[in-house]
Amino acid sequence: MTAAARVFFLGGLTSYRALFNWLRPAYYFPTMLAGPLFQILFFAYLGRSVGAESDAFYVVGNAVQISAMAGVFGMAITIGGERWTQTLGPLLATPASRIAIFLGRAVPNLAQGLLVSTFGFTMSWLLVDFDPPRSSIPGLAVIVLVTTTSCTAFGMVIGALGLRLRDSFMIANPAYFLMLLLCGVNVDVEVLPEWLESISRVLPLTHGIEAAREVVSGAPLSSVVGLVRTELVIAVVYAAAAFFLLRYFEEESRRKATLDRM
Amino acid sequence: MRNALRIFGAGWWMNMKQLTQSPLFVFTSLIEPLIMATIAFYTAKAGGKPEALFYLAIGAGVMGIWSSTLFGSGGVISWQRWEGTLELLVASPPPLIVIVVPLTIATSSIGIYSLTATLLWGRFLFGIPFDLAHPWLFAVGLPIAVVAMGLLGLLIASTFVLYREANALSNMLEFPIALVTGLLFATSLLPGWTRPIGWLLAPTWAARVIRESALGGNPLFEIAMCVILSGVYLVLASHFLRVLEVRARAKATLALA
């Protein structure tokens, strides 16, 4: 195994296990499965109470958005946690490929996001009025994969900002909650004021959720290729921005000796 | 008694100052409820029910009080543990309950910011009228509701003495409790078996106290329920803290983080 591959696989796996304090179920289940499931149920019932949209509207929006729990929080904690445990300095002092280091830490979070999203869809099918046509499931899976990727890329940007800020939660928390409002998760983006809608169009999730809703309502995947492509472009742009910011903040923190400042 | 009151005052004020210095806590108390309120307002508009806006504004505000209570109470033991002060507090002469009560009441008191911010947000951005039907009952009921939620936070915090996973559990409880207590919608929508769970939780009655005193109605029964539940939470938390403190001392796990 080459050095970069070792850093990618072993570094990513070790970091992921550390994320849940060595994967204790007592941390994992409440945070990654129970909390997101109740989020879906809460908004589905809120929608029912005022007769706004169908359960499927809220299920699709929230089941896709909860992948951000891993993508956004996971990446923010992964990088912030290195600083907290004072391993960030030694990690960045190594000559290892930065792409291998950070991509290795992103991939488990991406897989985690997919798992959380799948769990959300499955439980919603069991608990509320959500019964998508079986033929829509492969298309839905593709869309969720792309959307989770863009969420994780966005999370990498937040993680990168964590190199500069003392507390990356200060961005991760607002980002997660603003997604509930701005990305069409619970509110159709077209009813938002124009300037908010413009912001939502450059955020991850928005296009993916729109595509997922169409596919769940019976449209073929080919009819939402444009939306999926836009989501993918957003993922690439955020990933590129994250690598630029990571390198920039790393160099700046070396110059100013601020890497371990908490 | 005088000492207990002095500890209460000092602990409450100290924790209020500490929490308001935390940008993350301020976000949880101020910004998050505004986001939830905005979602609720747009949802009500989409459903063609603008008359529900004031109802939702109050619900989102109470949800803000609950979020800050949960976040603060979930963290209160963990933060002391991380700072290395938990052992000192446990070793000090006053009973642990006397020390922890003001800390958790402080977290719910900060939630009053949430309610105020949410109602102002609704008033100025969405034109939701803010007319109190019973201002005096509102003035009496609000602090009682806040104390009841703070004491539920105390009960939650008391069970966290032994557990490192306290924060993870408290993160999970935000939406389930908002769901079963009907903070943003009537609990009659939920399956029947969930309703008794809601009756045992202070946010159910706290939201009703504030809603009925604001929208009209007689909240005296709800105020009484808040007082009764506060007493029950206090007795249970006191018992749990005593038992768990002895167990944590015996196992030498108090400081393990």
Image: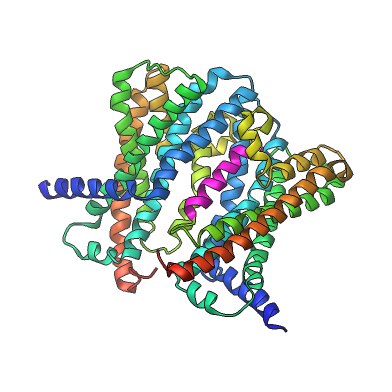
Quadrant (top left/top right/bottom left/bottom right) for the N terminus of chain A: bottom right
Place residue B51 in its image quadrant.
Answer: top right
Span shown in magenta: A169-184
Residue at (47% x, 37% y) in the render: B33
Query: Across the whole image, how many numbered discs are drawn on residues?
Result: 0
Residue at (65% x, 39% y) in the render: A200
* Towards the viewer: B99 or A84: A84
Left or right? Give the position of B24 relative to A93. left
Compared with residue B231, is residue A249 higher up or lower down, i.e. above or below? below
On the image, the x and y values in percent for residue A100 come to: 66, 72
* Towards the viewer: A168 or B255: A168
* Towards the viewer: A213 or A176: A176
Left or right? Give the position of B172 relative to A45. left
Residue at (32% x, 51% y) in the render: B237
The answer to whether residue A20 is seen in the rendering is no
Q: Is residue A171 magenta?
A: yes
On the image, the x and y values in percent for residue A247 come to: 58, 66
Left or right? Give the position of A187 relative to B240. right
Q: Mainly helix, strand or loop, the magenta region? A: helix
On the image, the x and y values in percent for residue B83 come to: 32, 64
